[in-house]
Every structure is written in C-alpha cells, then in structure tokens.
Image (tube, grey):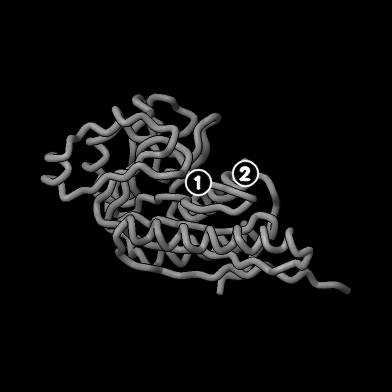
Amino acid sequence: MNIAVKQQVKFNDLGLIDYKECWDYQEKLFQETIALKIESRASNIQHLTSNHLIFCEHPHVYTLGKSGDEKNLLLNEDQLKIKSATYYKINRGGDITYHGPGQIVGYPILDLDNFFTDIHKYLRFLEEVIILTLKDYGIESGRIEGLTGVWLDWENPVQARKICAMGVRTSRWVTMHGFAFNVNSDLSYFKNIIPCGIQDKAVTSMNKELGRELDMEEVKQKVKKYFAEVFECEIV
C-alpha cells in the first residue's frame, strides 16, 4: 500500500519584527522559490521547492495593497508619527489594513504546485484555519460572499465584524503575504483607516469578544495545528 508523503512546511516565528524587514525576508524566500521553478523548467530537471510558514507581530503599521485607495488612510505623516505608526504601499492584493502587537500575522510562502493550483481554494483554506481556531474558543465565525477574511455574525450585514484580514500575492503559483488575525489587538488603530476599503463593517478581536487577554502562544499552536490539518502538510 502506498502511503502519501505529506508536504513539509518550514515554520519560523520571528516574534516582533519591523514590517519592512519581514517583507524583505518574505520577498527573498518568494524569489528563491520562483527562481528554482524557472531553473527546473529551463533545464528540464525537477528541483524540489521549499514551503514556508512565518508567524510574527509587527510594530504599529498600515499597509496598502496594490489595488487600494490611499484615501482609506485617514492620517497624515505627522499624525502617523504621533501614533508611532508607519505606512507602506505593498505588492499584495486588497486594500488597506493595520498590523500591530497582539495580532498573529501569518505569511505562508508556499509553492502551490506542491498542493493545488487554485487561488480561490487557497484563500478558503486560510480562512478555514482561522475558523477552526476560533471554534476552539467558542467563537463561531464564517465567510461573507465576495469578501475575503473571517467574520463574526457574518449572516447579519449590520452586526458583521472582521476578526481576520487576508491579502496575498502569487506568481508562478508561489504565494506570499497572508493573514492578520486579531487576538489581543489594540482596535483603536483601526479607527484611523477604512479597513479593507469597507465602510459599513466593523473590526473585532478575540480579546474583545471573550472579554479577556488570550495566551498568544496557545493561539499560535492552534493555528499551526489547523494549518497542518487543512493543508494536509507536516510543519517542521
């Protein structure tokens, strides 16, 4: 009987790290994987590509996706300094979002040729990882048709609120960027933007919903566990 060998995903928790430093690191892994795939095609010799999952937290930062509108940032340069926040225009999809301490930011750099070549499915899988994690804490969550991310009260347009935002970039089926999961986030920073360009939807966090601080390490372990289950991979 043939036993399927699971794809390995190299895990790295970078802790609290400057946004640009982490973006550069992602870009390095992303470009190395793409270069290997191009070399495989040119030489007709199959080179095995690596898969990575990065966890981190960032100091207060706002990032605007390539299709985003700068008007959705409601602060000028001086106001950003007062808030001790930085701002970057970046190369992922989606509009504007906030990253900060107390938020689990996940960056999967996966070669989807090792899994499945379907971006829609990839995003739904990322959402499922967070949905399963929240369920362990008694928080029911789901999806809103036409919008990425994970939502609470998703079936009620008036009460729907986002707990995890997503935005990715892909090239030659290699992914980068990923998800931002509000665990113990300071939600006041979201008041300085129109999150993801959506004016009529609120943002929330696990600690707001549960009324207590969460153990970040415990939540990270659950996200890792469900990532491995959903993507049927081995995290090493």
Task: Please provide percent x and percent y for residue 145.
Answer: 55, 30
Residue 79 disc label: none
Q: Is residue 130 above or below residue 229?
A: above
Left or right: 192 as drawn, with respect to 226:
left
Report the residue that reaches farthest toward the right: 1
The secondary structure type at the circle numbered 1 is: strand
Name the amino acid type tagged 1: Val
Q: Are marks 1 and 2 in contact (CB under 8 Å)?
A: yes
Residue annotated with mark 2: 119
Residue pictured at 59% horizontal, 65% vertical: 51
Residue pictured at 21% horizontal, 42% vertical: 188
The secondary structure type at the circle numbered 2 is: helix
Q: Is residue 95 above or below residue 172?
A: above
Left or right: 35 as drawn, with respect to 134:
right
Name the amino acid type tagged 2: Ile
Task: Please provide percent x and percent y for residue 13.
Answer: 41, 69
Per the model, the C-alpha gap separating discs 1 and 2 is 9 Å
So how many labels did they put on this image? Answer: 2
Residue annotated with mark 1: 168
Q: Is residue 6 above or below residue 144?
A: below
Are there few (<14), some (14-19), or many (20+) residues within 10 Å of tag 1? many
Quadrant placement of the N terminus: bottom right
Residue pictured at 45% horizontal, 27% vertical: 156
Task: Please provide percent x and percent y for residue 198.
Answer: 38, 28
Q: Earlier in the sequence, mark 1 or mark 2?
A: 2
Residue pictured at 48% horizontal, 39% vertical: 93
- The foreground one among 108 and 162 is 108
- The foreground one among 219 and 124 is 124
